[in-house]
Amino acid sequence: MQGRIEEMDEEGLGVLTVDRKLHVPFTAPGDVVEVRGWRRKKHRLIATEYKVIEPSGLRTEPVCPYFGKCGGCTLQHLPYSEQIRFKSDKLSNLLDMMVDVSPSPRVYGHRNRIDIVISTRGIGFRRRGTWWDAVDIEGCPVFGPSSTRVLHSLREFIEDHDPALYNIRQNEGFLHYIVIREGKFTGELMINLITSEGPLPEAFPEYFDYADSVYWSVNRTPSDVSYGEIRMFWGKEFIQEKLDDTVYLIHPNSFFQTNSYQAVNLVKRVAELSEGDRVLDLYSGVGTFGIYLAKRGLHVEGIEMNPLAVEMARRNNELNGVEAAFRVGKDRDVKDLAGYDTVIVDPPRAGLHPKLIRRILRDVPENIIYVSCNPKTLKQNLDVLLEKYGIDYVAGLDMFPHTPHVEVVAKLKAKV
Ligand SMILES: C[S@@+](CC[C@H](N)C(=O)[O-])C[C@H]1O[C@@H](n2cnc3c(N)ncnc32)[C@H](O)[C@@H]1O
């Protein structure tokens, strides 16, 4: 089948419509493509054998040599302004209103965390479309130059000590992952090596003597995951990241917004939209929003399910000299929302728990700031909340350049 790509689907694949719709990876509107093979994935037909016969004038040269093979980025062939246009169109269609997307201040070197598999197939990221294969990389442009340095040191360590690499298919081997994290505004570097049970050569940390914090974690479960029980660390227990005037601690097992340069804009946006004095930061994580707001004199309470994140939020309180009150709790157990001027919600991809939605509709706090990494569940939740709320503000912030993902901030105001 041959024809011109006229549009992109919500995951950023080009759509070729002839007698059916074929979704063609790594293509751009205007490309003329020939598709020879495809497979069904959920409700879509994804092209598996295809070539671009006539490239679109929209295209740009991808920066990363692994683009197209690595499963990480899917949109590097589009100029960044086109990526922003694509995300704005996607949000506008979904939410049925014009939604602007603010570009990320940096589009390479912006990611503050990468999880590298150390496998017999390669040391790098999963090969696109596979769970069992990896693309061997020297560095990741989306993370920046320190990834190249860490991967070089890791290869030296492997050459000198010959540890067993992870066999993904058999789920065996000693080394599994190395997670690299970097405070983009502090320059601090953390690495976390994840292995199965077994002895780690003593010399390991010496290979990374330039890192501020070196961890060794052991995954004793059969799950293929890039975290484990902490066995030992060298150097600092935490590294720090700074967003505007607020400092946050990063621990190997704690979440932090992955694009620091855009996370600053996100916390500032949330602060601008917050009204009144009493704020509830729900799904508060390590206190990213709560502490920033407490620094601005607001009375903040935070609720978060993960005890480690709450512990980190409390430490972040101390570090910043503020007194936001963080506690461990689940969204569905929140009892009373009536006393808050603003409720911030930043749920995981599944969106708000139905019980929480019922509580919001019962207590009707005046302002809700909804931060979402999944516009689909945002839309579903908004449709229900609109019974008692009007939408005051919606905007996208691009936290994830070269991927189809986009963060959304919405402010809802109770109807009078
Ligand atoms: C998208 S993260 C946001 C974290 C934080 N707002 C930030 O910006 O760093 C979602 C957070 O919700 C927490 N979480 C997930 N399910 C939850 C639940 N049922 N109740 C409370 N918190 C939950 C996760 O542990 C995670 O910290």
Image (tube, rainbow, N blue to C red):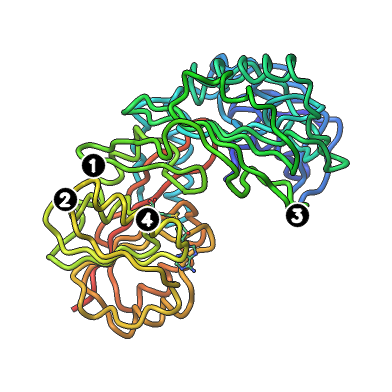
For the point 45% across and 77% down, the residue is: 332
Q: Calculate the distance from the C-alpha at mark 3 to the C-alpha at mark 2.
A: 47 Å
Q: Earlier in the sequence, mark 1 or mark 4?
A: 1
Disc 1 CB within 8 Å of nearest ligand 1 atom: no
Of helix, strand and loop, which one carries label 2? loop
Q: Where in the figure is residue 31, as x and y percent of width and height?
A: 64, 23
Of helix, strand and loop, which one carries label 1? strand
Label 4 crowd (10 A; few <14 / some 14-19 / many >=20): many
Q: Residue 42 carries which label?
A: 3
Q: Earlier in the sequence, mark 4 or mark 2?
A: 2
Q: Calculate the distance from the C-alpha at mark 1 to the C-alpha at mark 4.
A: 19 Å
Q: In which quarter of the image is residue 27?
A: top right
Is the residue under label 1 in contact with that under label 2 (CB below 8 Å)?
yes
Q: Mark 4 points at which residue?
A: 371
Is the residue under label 3 in contact with that under label 1 (CB below 8 Å)?
no
- Three-letter residue code for mark 4: Val
Of helix, strand and loop, which one carries label 3? loop
Q: Calculate the distance from the C-alpha at mark 2 to the C-alpha at mark 1.
A: 8 Å
- Three-letter residue code for mark 1: Thr
Q: Name the residue under label 1.
A: 246
- Three-letter residue code for mark 2: Lys
Mark toward the viewer: 4 or 2: 2
Q: Which of marks 1 and 3 is nearer the N terminus?
A: 3
Q: Which of marks 3 and 2 is nearer the N terminus?
A: 3
For the point 72% across and 36% down, the residue is: 176
